[in-house]
Amino acid sequence: MEQTSSKSNGGTFGSRSNFIVVMVMILGVFVAILNETLLNVALSKIMDDIGISPSTAQWLATGYLLVIGVLIPVTAFLIQRFTTRSLFLSAMGLFTAGTFIAAIAPGFSILLIGRVLQAAGTGLLFPLLTNVVFSIVSIEKRGSAMGTIGIVITFAPAIGPTLSGIIVEHFSWRVLFLSVLPIALFVILFAFWKLKNVTETTKPKIDGLSLVLSTLGFGGIVYGFSSAGEGHGGWTSTEVLLPIVIGILSLGLFTWRQLTMTEPFLDLRVFAYRIFRISTLIMMIVMMAMFSAMMLLPIFLQNALGYSPLQAGLVMLPGGIVMGIMSPITGRLFDRFGAKWLAVIGLALIGHTLWQFAFITLSTSYSAIMILNTLLMLGISMLMMPVMTNALNELPPPSYPHGTAIIGTLQQVAGAVGTALLVTVMSNISKGYLEDLPGAAEDSTHQIFAMIAGMKSAFLLAFGLVVIAWATSFFLKAAMPPKGELKRKQASAHEW
């Protein structure tokens, strides 16, 4: 009787209780990721309301990314040390507290504290959700399970700018936080009532030196490249160079320490698995490509074509909807055919759209840009979750928290590095264009053409990176954990 109930009610997730656990966590992740993109459109209103400069306001975004970049490597330790229930409730508690503080913040300092608390909760939620799915779902159904999760993590950031534009246009920016608060409180109450523990705790010891080196390493790199990407001085400025140098040196020491420890803080030995290495490289490049479109297109639409922030945000909406629709479909295709050809076709589509973006002009229509962006997001949806699932499938179950943390961290680093590189290329080419034409810097038409020239170079760089990922994707193959670990995992899943 129990077997029948599990099968009919749990489906992909094995049992009704497992299904409820995952759905509760997905709702929490959805709220957190939605919040991540809500604030970008509202920054100008916040600057006017609390009287801060653009460079100060940018800390609301930079600080958020910095906390996530620092916290994600720690999630491997936290997932092993604490139960699913306690960790999820703590993460949602931090996020909810931060949301409330941000909503009532009288000034910048309190608002930044709220954002930092939100980021601390967000940084824990997705790695925890991924680890739970890999702990309770059989390897044959993980594509479908991760596809279900993909609906949330792709749709939420896509509707964020559009929703934010609508709210900010008619209400105070504080409504952005107040509208999220009731959902977050509901998730906490529902999780307190229904959420069960589904992962084993091993009580690992915290290594203080590894924690410090991890914080300095990943934090320094994310901060340094984010500063360059946001235009806080050139690559020779102390604000950019010093954090990057400290970050690289710290990461070198961190890597050496992890490889020489019996119980590493973050087990970098997962890179010994070939498919994991290839998949991680592909996901980092795809993250850079996605950031190129998300960053450059709104700039072009607003500064060159004169569209409003809301119109610029709406360009992204169809792509997000397509990603949400395609995510479960590609999950099922992964379960049946594997990741290789999904990645090959998806990367070819991404490369094609980036090439087209490189040659957009003032005569390119709004609808054409929207269609190209939708095709780009279709390509990303074909490979992001399947490639990630395939990467983690190769690892033995005890390494899932480490693999998830590493992928999440490197995606954050790739996003920061990619943004910085693309902004630098666009700025330098645009500047060179204006310098070659006497008096062009004061002419608005020439400024627009300079921007187009800069965007072309940035998109061509992104295209070149995707070509590398496309060539690499041919080396992908279906990944399976070591046989002994697979048998142990199947026995554990049967017990659940």
Image (tube, rainbow, N blue to C red):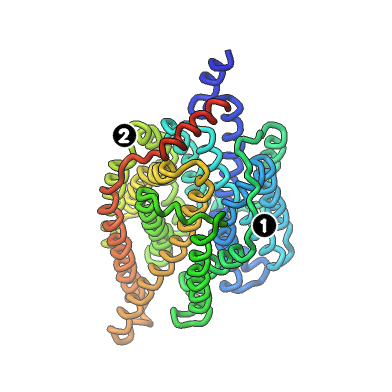
First reached walking from the N terminus: tag 2 or tag 1: 1
Mark 2 vs 1: CB contact within 8 A:
no
Residue type beneath disc 1: Leu
Q: Is residue 227 visible?
A: no
Residue 163 x %, y %: 54, 49
Which class describes the residues within 10 Å of circle 1: few (<14), some (14-19), or many (20+)? many
Horizontal side of 184 relative to 333 (left or right) equals right
Compared to residue 47, the image places residue 153 above or below, namely: above
Which class describes the residues within 10 Å of circle 2: few (<14), some (14-19), or many (20+)? few
Q: Residue at x 28, y 84 (%)?
A: 436
Find residue 144 and report its image quarter. Answer: top left
Q: Nearer the viewer, residue 370 or 113?
A: 113
- Circle 2 is placed at which residue position? 337
Horizontal side of 474 relative to 219 (left or right) equals left
Compared to residue 50, the image places residue 181 above or below, namely: above
- Circle 1 is placed at which residue position? 117
Q: Residue at x 49, y 54 (%)?
A: 406
Compared to residue 437, the image places residue 156 above or below, namely: above
Residue 243 x %, y %: 53, 75
Compared to residue 83, the image places residue 10 above or below, namely: above
Find residue 356 and report its image quarter. Answer: bottom left
Residue type beneath disc 2: Phe
Quarter of the picture containing the N terminus is top right
Q: Residue at x 57, y 67 (%)?
A: 213
Quarter of the picture containing the C terminus is top right
Q: Nearer the viewer, residue 477 or 53?
A: 477
Residue 151 x %, y %: 47, 39
In front: label 2 or label 1: 2
Q: CA distance from mark 2 to mark 1?
A: 41 Å
